[in-house]
Image (spheres, rainbow, N blue to C red):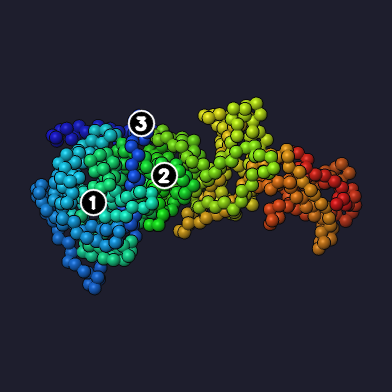
């Protein structure tokens, strides 16, 4: 490849980087059809995980004399002094024993931006000269997204990687990573070890606090089995791990979920899509966006959620420029993202962005991927006779998560004649503080036509919405999110219901308050458990309005409502009439002294 050819490729990409953001997003959308096809035709393979989160715990450096178990790793010759065939022994982590072992490897390929080493036992077994050529070509020259390699694409987007070994290249070590498969069949496909950016021996809390010997190298570890090292899946992993190396240089303390979301986004910009991550999120979409599971939990859906969040910011809030700023900004988690968005002129707060994102996920409102989320729960309406209304209590939701509660007609064919959802009221009641909740409802008129509306909540965190028109399906989507994300994950509870308001009746009683003179209590018990709904009380004095409609307060048992009011001494109780109203329908009335 000539220098002129390199300049031509660079210049073509440079034109894109200097294009205004709106036009740049449009250019990326031109590949949307191609990327969607990729998502649909990619074979289903075992879900791969990244090993980098294991090393996210802050390393204690430099080591003390007592901790220095081995001499400082030797400094290796800088490029281009290393010829193909150079032998080197690397330190590599064993994810099963959480200890290090040595990997004898041989330099099998040299690219413009990389050294490619192969573990000796994997050469001509799973890795061949054709494998080496394909990886170097993808890293240096071409990706599915266009005539630019992984390295120039990702570094132009996020910035240059560190160069601790002063060789001007990234070392790619192909080895059979020693890991443990989880119950989902996942495996460690690759990782970046931040310990390699130090010198000597360091303590890593992620490895039981044991000593980690540094390779003193800007290197990525890429699996050879079960990862298909001879296919594009391996190139996907390389792009993913390269972002981790770059992100570490700019913000080594970034939260795992942000780092992993940007890593999948880096692969996406190169034309690779981690379909298994999206599929895992589709199956379990009610996970928290801002937390990352420990070794005992599966991280697969979290990769999908974090990637979709970054993709959403890409499509709605400034494209690649915004993602670059997130990686290079020292702020962490949602706080860092909020600072970046404010810095480029976006005034929307994170609660509103998160609420819009949760809806976009369900209706698949993306230009580059297609989603089909599995509901958190599905209810068929109308309910069979004798089963009563739908009332579900004590459901839990973690911070920065959303639930997808589906209500649909049991007979869609006849729904246009007598819609099963007509007259249905959906109610919601969440743990306080109410300002941390947002609730939306999607109403479907058919498979493709829908409307979205916010459910207004009271200060107590309750709200309700009556479904309108001929609806065959509705989705209630509560979400929990803090304006300032907490250090520890919070889980809150909520209740919800689906009731047919026209069928609800009340048994009401009116009596003087036994403690407070001249105060009266109206207590009403509904025939169905209400969630997010409350009847109102209107008082009249001889046909004149005495007190405008006021909501009743739900008692702790959740099955009764009470309203307390003061009656002036000059007014006779017999002159006061009361009326209970629920959704515009009178459900009880009487004179004050009646029981």
Quadrant in the rendering for residue 265: top left
Q: Secondary structure at mark 1?
A: loop
User: In the rendering, at what x and y percent does residue 123 appear?
Assistant: 16, 47
Please give left or right for residue 484 compared with residue 160 in the image.
right
In-front residue for pair 324/183: 183
User: In the rendering, at what x and y percent does residue 275 appear?
Assistant: 36, 40
Q: Residue at x 48, y 56 (%)?
A: 489
Residue density around tag 3, few if under 14, some if 14–19, many if 20 or more, within 10 Å:
few
Choose mark 1 or mark 3, whichever is in front.
1
Q: Is residue 248 visible?
A: no
Choose mark 3 or mark 2, whichever is in front.
2
Label 1, label 2: how far apart the Cα atoms are: 25 Å
In-front residue for pair 196/542: 196
Q: Residue at x 59, y 41 (%)?
A: 379
Q: Residue at x 29, y 48 (%)?
A: 189
Q: Which mark is residue 138?
A: none
Residue under numbered circle 3: 37
Q: Secondary structure at mark 2?
A: helix
User: In the rendering, at what x and y percent does residue 356 appear?
Assistant: 50, 40
Q: Can you say whether 432 is above or below 417 in the image?
A: below
Please give left or right for residue 451 compared with residue 150 in the image.
right
User: In the rendering, at what x and y percent does residue 39 appear?
Assistant: 36, 35
Label 3, label 2: how far apart the Cα atoms are: 19 Å
Residue under numbered circle 1: 176
Picture quarter with the N terminus: top left
Say if mark 1 contacts mark 2, CB within 8 Å.
no
In-front residue for pair 432/89: 89
Q: Tally the numbered discs.
A: 3
Q: Can you say whether 434 is above or below 322 in the image?
A: below
Closer to the N terminus: mark 1 or mark 2? 1
Q: Secondary structure at mark 3?
A: helix
Residue under numbered circle 2: 280
């Amino acid at each position: 490849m000539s220098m002129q050819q390199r300049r031509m490729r660079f210049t073509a990409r440079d034109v894109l980087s200097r294009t205004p953001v709106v036009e740049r997003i449009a250019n990326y959308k031109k590949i949307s059809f191609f990327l969607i096809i990729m998502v649909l035709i990619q074979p289903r393979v075992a879900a791969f995980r990244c090993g980098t989160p294991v090393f996210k715990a802050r390393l204690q450096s430099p080591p003390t004399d007592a901790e220095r178990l081995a001499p400082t790793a030797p400094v290796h010759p800088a490029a281009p002094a290393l010829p193909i065939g150079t032998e080197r022994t690397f330190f590599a982590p064993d994810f099963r024993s959480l200890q290090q072992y040595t990997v004898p490897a041989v330099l099998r390929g040299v690219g413009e931006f990389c050294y490619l080493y192969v573990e000796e036992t994997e050469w001509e077994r799973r890795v061949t000269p054709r494998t080496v050529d394909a990886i170097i070509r993808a890293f240096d020259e071409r990706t599915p997204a266009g005539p630019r390699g992984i390295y120039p694409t990702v570094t132009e987007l996020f910035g240059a990687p560190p160069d601790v070994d002063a060789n001007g290249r990234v070392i790619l070590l192909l080895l059979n990573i020693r890991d443990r498969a989880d119950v989902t069949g996942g495996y460690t496909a690759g990782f970046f070890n931040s310990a390699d950016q130090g010198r000597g021996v360091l303590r890593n809390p992620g490895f039981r606090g044991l000593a980690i010997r540094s390779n003193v190298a800007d290197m990525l570890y890429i699996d050879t089995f079960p990862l298909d090292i001879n296919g594009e899946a391996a190139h996907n992993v390389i792009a993913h791990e390269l972002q981790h190396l770059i992100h570490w240089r700019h913000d080594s303390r970034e939260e795992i979920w942000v780092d992993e979301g940007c890593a999948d986004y880096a692969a996406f910009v190169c034309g690779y899509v981690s379909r298994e991550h999206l599929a895992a999120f589709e199956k379990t979409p009610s996970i928290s966006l801002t937390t990352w599971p420990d070794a005992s939990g599966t991280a697969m859906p979290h990769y999908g959620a974090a990637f979709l969040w970054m993709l959403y910011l890409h499509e709605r809030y400034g494209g690649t420029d915004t993602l670059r700023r997130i990686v290079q900004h020292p702020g962490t988690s949602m706080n860092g993202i909020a600072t970046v968005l404010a810095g480029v002129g976006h005034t929307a707060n994170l609660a509103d962005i998160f609420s819009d994102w949760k809806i976009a996920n369900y209706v698949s409102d993306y230009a580059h991927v297609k989603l089909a989320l599995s509901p958190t729960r599905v209810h068929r309406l109308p309910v069979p006779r004798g089963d009563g209304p739908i009332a579900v209590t004590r459901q839990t939701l973690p911070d920065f998560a959303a639930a997808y509660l589906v209500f649909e007609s049991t007979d869609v064919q006849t729904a246009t004649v007598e819609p099963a959802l007509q007259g249905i009221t959906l109610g919601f009641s969440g743990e306080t503080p109410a300002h941390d909740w947002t609730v939306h409802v999607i109403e479907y008129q058919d498979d493709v036509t829908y409307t979205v509306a916010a459910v207004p909540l009271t200060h107590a965190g309750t709200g309700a919405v009556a479904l309108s028109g001929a609806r065959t399906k509705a989705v209630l989507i509560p979400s929990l999110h803090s304006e300032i994300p907490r250090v520890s994950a919070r889980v809150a509870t909520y209740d919800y219901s689906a009731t047919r308001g026209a069928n609800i009746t009340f048994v009401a009683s009116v009596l003087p308050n036994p403690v407070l003179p001249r105060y009266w209590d109206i207590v009403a018990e509904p025939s169905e458990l209400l969630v997010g709904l409350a009847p109102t009380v209107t008082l009249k004095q001889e046909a004149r309005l005495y007190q405008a409609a006021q909501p009743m307060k739900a008692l702790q048992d959740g099955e009764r409502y009470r309203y307390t009011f003061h009656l002036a001494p000059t007014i006779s109780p017999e002159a006061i009439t009361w009326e209970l109203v629920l959704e515009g329908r009178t459900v009880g009335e009487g004179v004050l002294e009646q029981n």
